[in-house]
Image (tube, grey):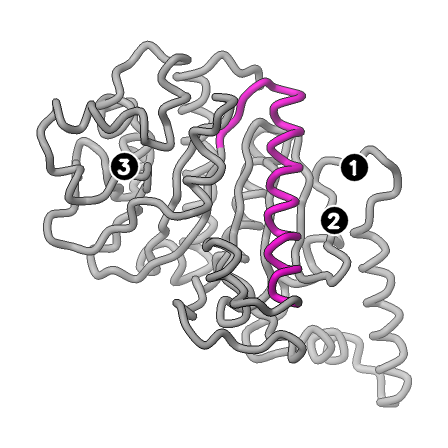
């Protein structure tokens, strides 16, 4: 698929132009530059919708080309806000906030997309910000994300506009759906951290205290659709953490790791709060913090994780919902 090559195939430190030029081995630099431009225009044309009805698996880009929406036909929406590699000079660096890139989460997002397609023949909805986090943080409110810069604000609006479009499509076609905000972390415990808008401290509270948090969690709207309790859905044998654990991905919360003790843990951020537990009761999900070690540190590990994640999502939704696949 040409649309999946626009950003994802260039090696770190090697531009797309350099890669194409090396493969083509054209001796005249002017001719090479002209052909590269034509190829870029051709690929760009391939990623644009050809009708008012987008094709599943086809990329759409914002006007600036900084945000990509790969249209899906599954009741699953995945966003990747912090894996961007572009540093547009017209957008200033932010003076405050968190600037670190969630390395290779843009590639992991594509590999997850392909894993779903391989296993189901269908695609999740995928939204990827290709701008570096130092320029804009699409997992913050608008003020903190862009610090008032119009260019950064446009990227933020494009990113969230695509998410809203994907959610509306899922609701209109399936009535409900799963939202996952994809991130990366390098905590030494190397656990897959699942953020349900519940902190690590809260995960260590009594069952009674945890149960009281259900209405504020990002999976509250899954509860009416399943036969299991909130605690079971959060960290029991049928929890998403348990499904990933059984596929060789140590995860928290889960039966093996109901909490992470004194370690650092991401319990969910603004995107999860914004799009899960909405007033319409149709979208549920979590923030997923993928460790570097064992997941993002090699192509083989990313591919294995993508396969495990796609399998677990399908099993999870079949187990807890009546969604048709």
Q: How crowded is mark 2: few (under 14 residues within 10 Å), some or many (20 or more)?
A: many
**Hey, which quadrant is residue 257 in on the image?**
top left
Q: How crowded is mark 3: few (under 14 residues within 10 Å), some or many (20 or more)?
A: many
| Marks 2 and 1, how far apart at CA | 9 Å
Up-down relation of residue 247 to residue 317 (above or below): below
Q: Name the residue under label 1.
A: 54
- Is 257 left or right of 167, judged from the image as shown? left
Q: Does the magenta stretch include residue 155?
A: yes
Q: Is residue 140 magenta?
A: no
The disc at residue 60 is: 2
Along the polypeptide, which appears first: circle 1 or circle 3? Answer: 1
What is the magenta range?
A: 151-178
Comparing 325 with 281, the one in front is: 281
| Marks 1 and 3, how far apart at CA | 36 Å
Tag 2–tag 1 contact (CB < 8 Å)? yes
- Is 140 left or right of 193, judged from the image as shown? right
Q: What element carries label 3?
A: helix
What residue is rendered at 72% in x and 61% in y? 65
What residue is rendered at 20% in x and 24% in y? 212
Along the polypeptide, which appears first: circle 2 or circle 1? Answer: 1
Q: Position of residue 52 (x, y in %)?
A: 85, 36
Q: Name the residue under label 3.
A: 245
What residue is rendered at 52% in x and 22% in y? 280
Quadrant housing the C terminus: top right
| Marks 2 and 3, how far apart at CA | 34 Å
Q: Is mark 1 on a helix, strand or loop?
A: loop
Our reading of the magenta stretch's main secondary structure is: helix
Along the polypeptide, which appears first: circle 2 or circle 3? Answer: 2
Q: Residues within 10 Å of mark 1 (few under 14, many from 20)?
A: some
């Amino acid at each position: 698929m040409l649309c999946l090559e626009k950003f994802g195939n260039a090696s770190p430190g090697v531009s797309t132009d350099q890669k194409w030029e090396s493969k083509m081995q054209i001796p005249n630099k002017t001719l090479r530059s002209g052909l590269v431009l034509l190829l870029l225009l051709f690929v760009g044309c391939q990623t644009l919708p050809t009708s008012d009805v987008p094709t599943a698996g086809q990329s759409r880009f914002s006007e600036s080309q900084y945000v990509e929406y790969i249209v899906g036909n599954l009741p699953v929406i995945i966003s990747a806000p912090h894996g961007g590699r572009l540093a547009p000079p017209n957008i200033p660096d932010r003076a405050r906030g968190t600037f670190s890139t969630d390395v290779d989460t843009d590639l992991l997002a594509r590999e997850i997309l392909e894993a779903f397609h391989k296993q189901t023949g269908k695609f999740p909805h995928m939204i990827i910000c290709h701008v570096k986090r130092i320029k804009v943080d699409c997992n913050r409110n608008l003020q903190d994300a862009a610090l008032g810069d119009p260019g950064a604000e446009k990227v933020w609006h494009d990113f969230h506009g695509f998410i809203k479009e994907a959610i509306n499509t899922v609701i209109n076609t399936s009535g409900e759906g799963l939202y996952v905000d994809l991130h990366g972390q390098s905590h030494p415990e190397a656990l897959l951290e699942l953020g349900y808008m519940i902190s690590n401290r809260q995960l260590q509270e009594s069952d009674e205290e945890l149960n009281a948090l259900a209405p504020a969690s990002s999976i509250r709207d899954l509860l009416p659709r399943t036969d299991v309790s909130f605690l079971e859905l959060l960290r029991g044998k049928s929890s998403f953490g348990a499904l990933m654990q059984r596929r060789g991905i140590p995860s928290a919360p889960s039966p093996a790791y109901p909490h992470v003790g004194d370690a650092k843990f991401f319990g969910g951020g603004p995107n999860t709060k914004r799009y899960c537990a909405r007033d319409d009761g149709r979208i549920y999900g979590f923030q997923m913090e993928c460790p570097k070690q064992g997941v993002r540190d090699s192509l083989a590990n990313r591919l294995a994780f993508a396969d495990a994640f796609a399998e677990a999502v399908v099993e999870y939704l079949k187990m807890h919902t009546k969604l048709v696949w």
